[in-house]
Image (spheres, helix red, strand yellow):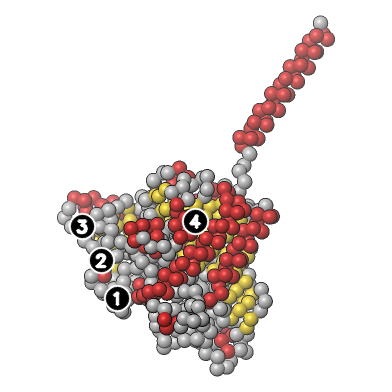
């Protein structure tokens, strides 16, 4: 009897053990974490919403074939906005998920800036680096180039690029500009001067540097070889990461459209033979070819596990006339009819709304579009969410997690999205324009330069101008103040604006950027040489 009971007990224990093993194995399959997603962010400088062919198919242009393919195989985000309409503030907000009034970066840093993005700010690459990501950046940084402010001290394992805009230093063969900048002055060693020359926005005494990690490898750099250098570096990073089996973040910031870098003409064709309107188009195609090379390398290595997110840092630099991009239908006619610009540096749609495409085979539905109201600040929380990373809880964020919009067709974006002053009328960083649904309210307008030099006078609006973008995407005719529609919207916007301003005023995590400059802070490879000239192997 006892032996029978013992056998029964042992048999039961064996069966229970097998059951537990089966459940454990099943649980391992169910809860086994996915391979970490690779992220590629491509940020294009000064690109217009209308520069992406896929946004204006009726134009039948063929300037962005690789971006068109990205859109065809991914998702266009048609109501996506830069966090600011100029360089440094936009980049800071993308990497921190916070408005400039929180992260401290409200306007651009200079060649002689001693600091940059405040060290109290936590960046996207820093957080991904902590969970095993290899992080690399290629291109324009513009968030501080000295010591602890440089890219490799802000979360990037590797960096190759220009510390600021590609017109903030001279080169031997300058890019196209208006007015055209002269080549470097090579008359001999001179004291570094940080002021722009009489040529209007041009530098002649400090060469534009190419930096790898923390070293200047070429000064002045050759603008015309940058695309190929960036291509080869990007594809190498992607392939090496795959060989190591390590997830990666690759952030590529392209300045092709800031001062157009049209590919060199064949020797038999003189530069004078190139029509000005061909320059921007050729530069756009050159940038697009780099996007194609990155997509191809990604597809060949880890296609189903890589999210590529293309967007712009702000709209076209309108004062550059024929060397500026297309805002598409977002003309800002209320402003342009009164003089002044309505693109870069402004909060009109032409300055804020940027071409954006997200591509992730098998995860993001192909050939789709979303009109959700989104911002470059949303990249920060979205990528962290996809990587399974919780952002630090000691600060407040302004971006939203757009995962469900990208992957599941959710159309819920920002209920309210604020646009800061970026160099036009008003004070840097002030949240002076508000989007909510189809409506947009302006509290201040004017003072941005248009092609030809007109700026339009600064105007305060109390009550605010409010436009219905569904009926009036050109922002030409504001709603009448007396209408019930206006009254409903203005009450809602006013309440939300006051709440946000109070939230920022009481936010203990607000940072303050140091914008002081010093000539010794300018990157200089060899002070004994004219324009700091040097060339090293890299």
Secondary-structure class at tag 3: loop
- Please say if the residues under marks 4 and 2 sit with CB atoms less than 8 Å apart: no
Report whether residue 58 is seen: yes
Residue at the image position 62 percent from the left and 53 percent from the top: 301
Number of numbered discs on residues: 4
Residue at the image position 65 percent from the left and 35 percent from the top: 28
Measure the C-alpha gap from mark 3 to mark 2: 14 Å
- Say whether residue 114 is left or right of residue 440: right
Measure the C-alpha gap from mark 4 to mark 2: 30 Å
In the depicted view, which residue is nearer to us: 509 or 325? 325
Q: Earlier in the sequence, mark 3 or mark 1?
A: 1
Report whether residue 112 is seen: no
User: Which quarter of the rendered picture does the C terminus lie within?
Assistant: bottom right
Q: Which residue is mark 2?
A: 333
Across and down, in percent, residue 492 comes to: 28, 51
Number of residues whose C-alpha sits closer than 10 Å to that of mark 3, classed few (under 14), some (14–19) or many (20 or more) = some
Across and down, in percent, residue 194 comes to: 49, 84
Measure the C-alpha gap from mark 3 to mark 4: 35 Å
Q: Which residue is mark 3?
A: 479
Residue at the image position 55 percent from the left and 61 percent from the top: 293
Q: Earlier in the sequence, mark 4 or mark 1?
A: 4
Secondary-structure class at tag 2: helix
Q: Is residue 514 above or below residue 366?
A: below
Q: Which residue is mark 4?
A: 309
Number of residues whose C-alpha sits closer than 10 Å to that of mark 4, classed few (under 14), some (14–19) or many (20 or more) = many
């Amino acid at each position: 009897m006892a032996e029978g009971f013992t056998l029964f007990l042992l048999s039961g224990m064996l069966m229970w053990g097998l059951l537990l093993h089966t459940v454990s194995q099943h649980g391992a399959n169910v809860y086994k974490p996915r391979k970490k997603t690779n992220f590629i962010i491509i940020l294009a400088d000064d690109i217009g919403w209308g520069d992406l062919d896929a946004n204006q198919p009726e134009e039948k242009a063929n300037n962005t074939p690789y971006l068109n393919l990205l859109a065809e195989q991914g998702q266009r985000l048609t109501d996506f906005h830069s966090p600011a309409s100029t360089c440094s503030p936009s980049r800071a907000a993308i990497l921190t998920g916070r408005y400039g009034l929180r992260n401290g970066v409200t306007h651009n840093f200079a060649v002689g800036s001693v600091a940059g993005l405040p060290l109290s700010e936590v960046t996207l690459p820093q957080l991904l680096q902590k969970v095993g990501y290899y992080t690399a950046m290629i291109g324009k940084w513009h968030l501080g180039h000295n010591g602890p402010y440089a890219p490799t001290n802000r979360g990037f394992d590797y960096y190759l690029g220009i510390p600021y805009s590609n017109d903030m230093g001279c080169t031997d063969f300058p890019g196209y500009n208006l007015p055209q900048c002269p080549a470097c002055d090579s008359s001999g060693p001179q004291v570094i001067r940080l002021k722009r020359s009489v040529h209007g926005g041009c530098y002649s005494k400090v060469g534009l540097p190419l930096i790898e990690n923390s070293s200047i490898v070429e000064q002045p750099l050759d603008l015309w070889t940058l695309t190929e250098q960036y291509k080869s570096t990007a594809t190498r990073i992607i392939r090496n990461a795959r060989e190591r089996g390590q997830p990666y973040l690759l952030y590529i910031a392209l300045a092709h459209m800031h001062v157009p870098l049209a590919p060199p003409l064949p020797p038999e064709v003189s530069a004078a033979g190139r029509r000005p309107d061909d320059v921007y188009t050729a530069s756009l195609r050159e940038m697009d070819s780099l996007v194609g090379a990155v997509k191809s390398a990604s597809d060949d290595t880890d296609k189903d596990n890589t999210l590529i997110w293309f967007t712009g840092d702000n709209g076209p630099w309108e004062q550059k006339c024929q060397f500026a991009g297309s805002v598409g239908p977002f003309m800002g006619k209320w402003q342009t009819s009164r003089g002044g610009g309505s693109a870069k540096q402004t909060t009109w749609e032409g300055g804020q709304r940027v071409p954006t495409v997200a591509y992730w085979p098998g995860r993001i539905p192909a050939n789709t579009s979303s009109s959700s109201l989104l911002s470059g600040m949303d990249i920060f929380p979205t990528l962290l969410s996809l990587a399974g990373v919780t952002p630090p809880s000691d600060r407040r964020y302004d971006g939203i997690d757009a995962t469900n919009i990208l992957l599941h067709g959710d159309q819920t974006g920002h209920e309210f999205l604020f646009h800061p002053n970026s160099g036009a009328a008003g004070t840097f960083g002030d949240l002076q324009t508000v989007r909510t649904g189809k409506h947009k309210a302006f509290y201040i307008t004017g003072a941005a330069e248009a092609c030809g030099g007109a700026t339009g006078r600064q105007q305060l609006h109390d009550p605010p101008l409010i436009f219905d973008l569904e009926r009036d995407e050109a922002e030409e005719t504001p709603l009448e103040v007396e209408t019930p529609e206006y009254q409903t919207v203005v009450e809602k916007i006013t309440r939300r604006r006051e709440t946000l301003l109070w939230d920022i005023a009481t936010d203990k995590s607000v940072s303050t950027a140091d914008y002081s400059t010093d000539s010794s802070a300018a990157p200089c490879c060899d002070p004994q040489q004219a324009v700091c000239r040097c060339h090293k192997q890299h």
